Amino acid sequence: MKKVLDVQNLHVSFETHIGEVKAVRGISFHLNKGETLAIVGESGSGKSVTTKALMRLIPHPPGRMREGKILFEGRDLVQLSEKEMETVRGKEISMIFQDPMTSLNPTMTIGRQLMEPLMKHQNMNKKTAEKRAIELLGLVGMPNPEGRMKQYPHQFSGGQRQRIVISIALACRPKILIADEPTTALDVTIQAQILELMKDLQKNLETSIIFITHDLGVVANIADRVAVMYGGQMVEIGTVDEVFYDSRHPYTWGLLSSMPRLNADERMELRTIPGTPPDLLQPPKGDAFALRSQYALNIDFQQEPPIYQVSPTHFVKSWLLHPDAPAFKPPANVQQSLRTMPNNFDKPRLFKEAH
């Protein structure tokens, strides 16, 4: 498949009064034309910072991209001027933000805010842009879209404001749509409509989507591939089937174990991952997840693991995949969800140093 986006060794940090926060630490990934890549992980793992970096929306100061390339159709977005980036944002790459109130101008009608990108990037006249704006509002489930064009953001509910933001992002039919928790404020019915709309857009226009979410159920329904982030790094990336049914990183197991089960006993406690994410003012020396992992080896506290290739599409950053690492088993509740069990899960895990 053709790559529409290729991120190479991206580092993003923020200067604070107590030191430099290394929010994103050397991540690399790509996005194929017409696919959906979901990025999952706990709050503070670097998901939103990564996607804002793709749009060149990291405020400087205090933030800066210390290193790396962001190749969009062969162009390195890091090297573009701000004026050149203005022709990319909204037209070729659009973003749906989690909080709609930070995205909408409270002094402008929502009709004007919808028409503006259409007139600027699509060269539509006012009448055509107005017609298209009404259609977009209808597509995202806004009642009486024509009558609400002259209203202001404060006259809408939180869920309705999010639908407006989604309409603006979709207005110019971008090649890449970045969605940062876009359905958080919506009820399940509208959420389903929005997800279906995104899938239709992807199918009809071959739009590529980067979808950030905490909801693994949404990931299973919408994504082609999944990237798991922890401590500013991507620790596992693969197809949906590989990550859900043949995951290899302990943090991925923790996320899957934390999913509520419909058939679970009501007295069963919801599993959680013990501990807290690492302090990125002083990132850990070895594996960032080692202190929270029951599978940690001695080497995890001494040296950062490399990235191992499990299959042509499946990559894992963990010493557990080293040829000298002991055999191990994932948690029982993750085992139950696996379709197949790899051979190296057969023996009980032993704690020893990998060489």
Image (cartoon, rainbow, N blue to C red):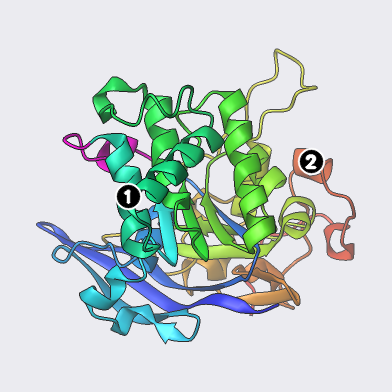
Looking at this view, is 118 or 70 the one in front? Answer: 118
- What residue do we see at 32% from left, 49% from top? 126
The residue that label 2 is drawn on is: 332
x and y percent of residue 175 in the render? 52, 66
Note whether residue 318 is visible. Answer: yes
Label disc, if present, on residue 137 of the rendered structure: none
Q: Please tell me whether the stretch drawn in magenta is mainly helix, strand or loop.
A: loop
Residue at the limit of the structure toward the top, as seen here: 267
Q: Is residue 33 above or below residue 145?
A: below
Does the magenta run of residues contain 114? no
- What residue do we see at 35% from left, 44% from top? 114
Does the magenta run of residues contain 101? yes
The residue that label 1 is drawn on is: 126
- Left or right? Give the position of 326 relative to 60: right
x and y percent of residue 171 in the render? 45, 51
Looking at this view, is 75 or 130 the one in front? Answer: 130
For disc 2, the neighbor class at 10 Å (few under 14, some 14 to 19, many from 20) is few
Q: Is residue 188 above or below residue 51?
A: above
Of mark 2 and mark 1, the one earlier in the sequence is 1
Amino acid on which disc 1 is placed: Lys
Q: Is residue 236 above or below residue 222?
A: below
Tell me which segment is drawn in magenta: 96-108
Q: Exactly how many numbered labels are in the figure?
A: 2
SS of the residue under disc 1? helix
Amino acid on which disc 2 is placed: Ala
SS of the residue under disc 2? helix
- What residue do we see at 56% from left, 63% from top? 235
Instruction: Look at the image and tell me in which quarter the C terminus lies.
Output: bottom right
**Residue 77 placement: quadrant:** bottom left
x and y percent of residue 192 in the render? 63, 33
x and y percent of residue 29 in the render? 54, 72
For disc 1, the neighbor class at 10 Å (few under 14, some 14 to 19, many from 20) is some
